[in-house]
Amino acid sequence: MLLTILGMSLAAAVGEQPAIVVRGPTVVAFFPPVSEKEIQADSDANEALADFQLYASQVREPFRKAGIDFHVVYALSFRIRVGTRITTFRTGQVRVGYYFVAPGKQHRVESGVETDVDLLRIAGEYFGTAAHHTPGNNRYRTFPAYSA
């Protein structure tokens, strides 16, 4: 966890603005950059970050199998390129959440930390079909992914 936090702080200190190239169904999970000191001082932020990272790690493989690109950024803004169009998304008051986008579709933003099951459900709603959690056995089934 320390390396992750230090990595977030370094990126924030450098002022990098992540850029995501969208070629198909894409989900960008975002969390504000935080320092180790902030995490130690705020148990709620520590728990939110831990949950955010856990659920992100749990959806990565089901998303990959469903053909959904998945990115995690620790920033207050990031750039999205769809074709030749580049837009900047600023998290504003949302701060923690998920940006769903695909070529030819209006983006969708979900705020707060979502569970892996919720992320898979939302992806299914937004992209039409996606990976779904199979209740009761911790396994995932995949269905045909979004096609442009």
Image (cartoon, rainbow, N blue to C red):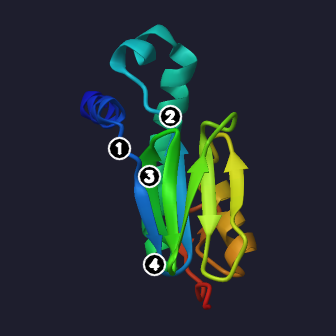
Work out whether residue 138 can be spotted.
no
Check disc 3 and report its element: helix, strand or loop: strand
Q: Which numbered mark, 3 or 2, is in the foreground of this view?
A: 2
Q: Which residue is mark 1?
A: 16
Q: Nearer the viewer, residue 31 or 133?
A: 31
- Quadrant of res 20: bottom left
Q: Where does residue 93 sit, x and y in percent of width and height? A: 69, 33
Q: Nearer the viewer, residue 118 or 69?
A: 69
Q: Which residue is mark 3?
A: 72
Q: Earlier in the sequence, mark 4 or mark 1?
A: 1
Q: Which numbered mark, 3 or 4, is in the foreground of this view?
A: 3
Q: Where does residue 56 sit, x and y in percent of width and height? A: 48, 51
The amino acid sitting under disc 3 is: Val
Label 3 to label 2: alpha-carbon separation: 11 Å
The residue depicted at 60 percent of the width and 39 percent of the height is 96
Q: Earlier in the sequence, mark 2 or mark 1?
A: 1
The amino acid sitting under disc 4 is: Lys
The amino acid sitting under disc 2 is: Pro
The residue depicted at 62 percent of the width and 91 percent of the height is 148
The residue depicted at 62 percent of the width and 42 percent of the height is 91
Q: Which mark is residue 65?
A: 4
Check disc 2 and report its element: helix, strand or loop: loop
The amino acid sitting under disc 1 is: Glu
Q: Which numbered mark, 4 or 2, is in the foreground of this view?
A: 2
Q: Is residue 117 left or right of residue 60?
A: right
Label 3 to label 1: alpha-carbon separation: 14 Å
Task: Tell me if residue 39 comes above or below residue 77 in the rendering.
Answer: above
Q: Where does residue 37 sit, x and y in percent of width and height? A: 37, 12
Check disc 4 and report its element: helix, strand or loop: helix
Q: Where does residue 55 sit, x and y in percent of width and height? A: 51, 48
Mark 3 surroundings within 10 Å by alpha-carbon count, few (fewer than 14), some (14 through 19), many (20 or more): some
Mark 2 surroundings within 10 Å by alpha-carbon count, few (fewer than 14), some (14 through 19), many (20 or more): some
